[in-house]
Amino acid sequence: MILTVGNIKGGVGKSTLACNIAAALSLADSENSILLIDGDKQGSAATFEQARTETRGNAGFTCVRAQGSEVLNQVRSMRDKFDHIIIDAGGQDNPSLRAGLVASDKVLVPVAPRSFETWALEDMVSLINEAQITNERLEALAVINLAFPRGKDNSQTEEIIREDFPSLHMLNPPIVQRKAWSDAAGQGLCLLDPPRKDVKAIEEFLALLAGLGINQNNIKVIYNVSTKKTKTA
Ligand SMILES: Nc1ncnc2c1ncn2[C@@H]1O[C@H](COP(=O)(O)OP(=O)(O)OP(=O)(O)O)[C@@H](O)[C@H]1O
Ligand SMILES: [Mg+2]
């Protein structure tokens, strides 16, 4: 699978999800070879890979930094060497994002359930539609991230996306804003790495992986209902 995680809106969780998906793919199958392309000048994904290597001794995936057309070149030269390529395309309408869309099988658009974010979707969907002219296989998926734990904002945003942007396939459930995500990333960990404290966050993440068609046979999360702790086997 070649997957771009992209949205021209900043701060919606592109890097967080791209890094977690890359790490989860490596945990799902140790035979998987995974390339994470950091297409953002900020280099968040590359920093995560360094932190993960320091914490675990091995990130489980390879990370390269590339900008604009280099993203396309990386995909073209690496697609036969890796089972999965994940692209963190960075914010704004940038050449890395356009290159990612042209080169990918899927694009995952994280959307925060707040007005400015849904307004910005129109431009993102136009970019996707443009890319689909040359890349007919590009499948467009959206997930609500940084969702509110309660209230109607999440479902209202989903409704707006369904009605106004029917070409985006909504993945469910929304990913709620939970400290576990930022805590894990800060240590170079993904949500499926120990200490796996937040069962709800893990469940939402596993649902996202399923929506992306990622085989979870080897990600066996065992729930201990009484302690609410989880462990993976
Ligand atoms: N589901 C979540 N729960 C809690 N915090 C989250 C969640 N998703 C992302 N974050 C936090 O939100 C912030 C923005 O996330 P991230 O950097 O992944 O967004 P981004 O879209 O890549 O931003 P940029 O456009 O700057 O590249 C980070 O501090 C991250 O830890
Ligand atoms: Mg980012």
Image (cartoon, rainbow, N blue to C red):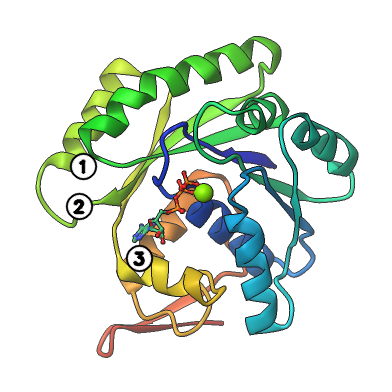
On the image, numbered disc 1 is attached to which residue? Answer: 154
Q: Position of residue 112 (x, y in %)?
A: 31, 42
Position of 155 relative to 59 (above/below)? above
Dot 2: within a 10 Å radius of its alpha carbon, few (fewer than 14), some, or many (20 or more) residues?
A: some
Q: Which quarter is ligand 1 in?
A: bottom left
Task: Residue lying at the far left in this picture: please name it.
Answer: 151
Question: Which element type, helix, strand or loop, lies under badge 2?
Answer: loop
Dot 1: within a 10 Å radius of its alpha carbon, few (fewer than 14), some, or many (20 or more) residues?
A: many
Q: Nearest the camera: 68 or 129?
A: 68
What's the residue type where badge 3 is placed? Ala
On the image, numbered disc 3 is attached to which residue? Answer: 201
Question: Which element type, helix, strand or loop, lies under badge 3?
Answer: helix
**Which residue sits at x=39%, y=45%?**
12
For the C terminus, give its image quadrant. bottom right
Task: Residue lying at the far top in this picture: please name it.
Answer: 133
Position of 195 relative to 21 (above/below)? below
Badge 3 residue CB within 8 Å of ligand 1: yes
For the N terminus, give its image quadrant. top right
Q: Position of residue 197 (x, y in %)?
A: 36, 81
Task: Residue lying at the far bottom in this picture: please name it.
Answer: 227
What's the residue type where badge 1 is placed? Asn
